[in-house]
Amino acid sequence: MHIVFFGDQHAESLGGAQVSMRLQRKYLERAGHTVTIVAPRMHAARGAGAAGDPGYVDLPSIPITADREYSLTWPGRRTDRFLDQALTRRPPVDLVHVQADFWGAYIGHRFAHRHGIPAVHTMHNRVDVGIAAVTPLHRPVLGALNLWRRTALRGIGVQPRGADGWAYLAGIAAESRAVTAPSGHFARRLEQHGVFGSVDVIWNGIDDEVREQVLAAAPAERVPGRPRFIWLGRMSPEKRLLPFLEAVVASDVDADIEIVGGGGERRAAERIAARAGRPGIRFAGRIGYADVLARIAAADAVVQTSIGFETQGMTPFEAATLGTPTVVSDPDIAGELRGGLWAVPSADDEPGRVAALAETLRLAADEIAAGRAPEPDPQVAADFRQSSRTAAMLEVYGRAIAD
């Protein structure tokens, strides 16, 4: 079977959805299938590593961030023609799997509709919360996005006329044979808001082999020293890195703090750390997948800080799979993890949320130092392996093709 993935961003760029697509491709190809990933061409130097890989179709694009990490491809007839021509060099396509929320979704569904190919759509993004986190003009932005969606997908399924985030998601999934979500809480919301009738829950996974290698290299006992906390992710407002650092300062916790990742808020984060004069706060920058997992395994706790934005939140699940507990700010993620965590109490405003996180960090540090850290649910480790996630997705593919 030849499956074509469509993403908003190149699979070699930073992001949980991109990591997931690379892993899905690896395990699908091991199962004997062919995978092509279609996405905008990446302009950052890191994208050069994918040059010559026949599994990537890089669409003409323009960079949209200062670091040139992320790009945009305009959906339209010119892109359609480029894509159709590029895919003549690949086997006939059996299934389209859209894993995008914006231009990648439009391009993917236009391709599936144009060629009469069944489509599966994975929802990675709760667009209303994400847009509200980065602009006070989120309502007009959502209105403009819905207008763009109706224009780009004219004649594809039944396009709802609404102007909110749920109407937008319903529109981009309108002609899908199946819709999947990476968590139970997001799947329930999609169903409740009429995005799709029945949404399959398929977690994003962890590479089985890398996990085994990391666990084999990890020490059998905790390395002595101060409690070690790690924060990982994209440094943007919805991830709440700056409130996390404010909570670290307010907590006066005696711990080592490691920050992994990159993004627009890095300089602001470094300024907070410098003003605090805390030698325990270290910025590791962007590192590779195996190194990320090794650092999670070596930490005493992962800290998850976004609230309401994540459709899964991969780092707490990766941590649980590696035996590392998590300080969890999002109650939906806490419920899905089923244990092995410190839940941050909810609060009505940002100062209250920072204070609650500071108190939880103090509690976690005390319990780690006393040897009383909670243990993650072992069933999460079994359910989060990519091999099991690929098997579950292949069942969805088979149903979509049969339908």
Image (cartoon, rainbow, N blue to C red):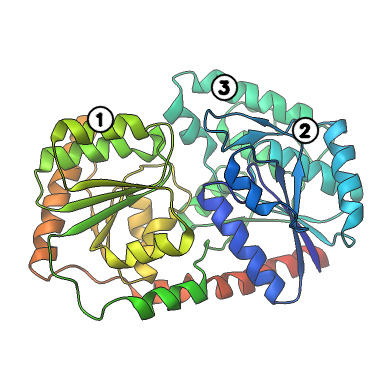
The residue that mark 1 highlights is: 271
Q: Looking at the picture, tell me which residue is in the foreground, 186 or 2.
A: 2
Please provide percent x and percent y for residue 129: 46, 35
Q: Which comes before the other along the chain, label 1 or label 2? A: 2
- Indicate the amino acid at tag 2: Pro
Separation of residues labelled 3 and 1 (CA atoms): 31 Å
* Residue at position x 14%, y 41% in the image: 278
Type of amino acid at the residue the image marks with label 3: Val
How many numbered discs, if any? 3
Can the viewer see residue 95? yes
Q: Is residue 196 visible?
A: no
Q: In this image, 340 relative to 194: left or right? A: left
- The percent coordinates of residue 25 (x first, y second) are 66, 64
Residue ID at (31%, 29%): 268
Q: Residue at x 87, y 48 (%)?
A: 86
Task: Give the Cα distance between marks 2 and 3.
Answer: 18 Å
Residue 344 spot, x, y in % from top left: 23, 49
Name the spot of residue 403 as percent of width and height, x first.
81, 63
> Which residue is at the front of the view, 123 or 18?
18
The label nearer to you, 1 versus 2, is 1
In the picture of the structure, the residue carrying the numbered disc 3 is: 141
**Number of residues whose C-alpha sits closer than 10 Å to that of mark 1, classed few (under 14), some (14–19) or many (20 or more):** few
Query: Which of the pair 91/195 is nearer the observer?
Result: 91
Point out the tag, 3 or 1, that comes first from the N-terminus.
3
* Among numbered discs 2 and 3, the one appearing first in the sequence: 2
Disc 2 versus disc 3: nearer the observer? 2
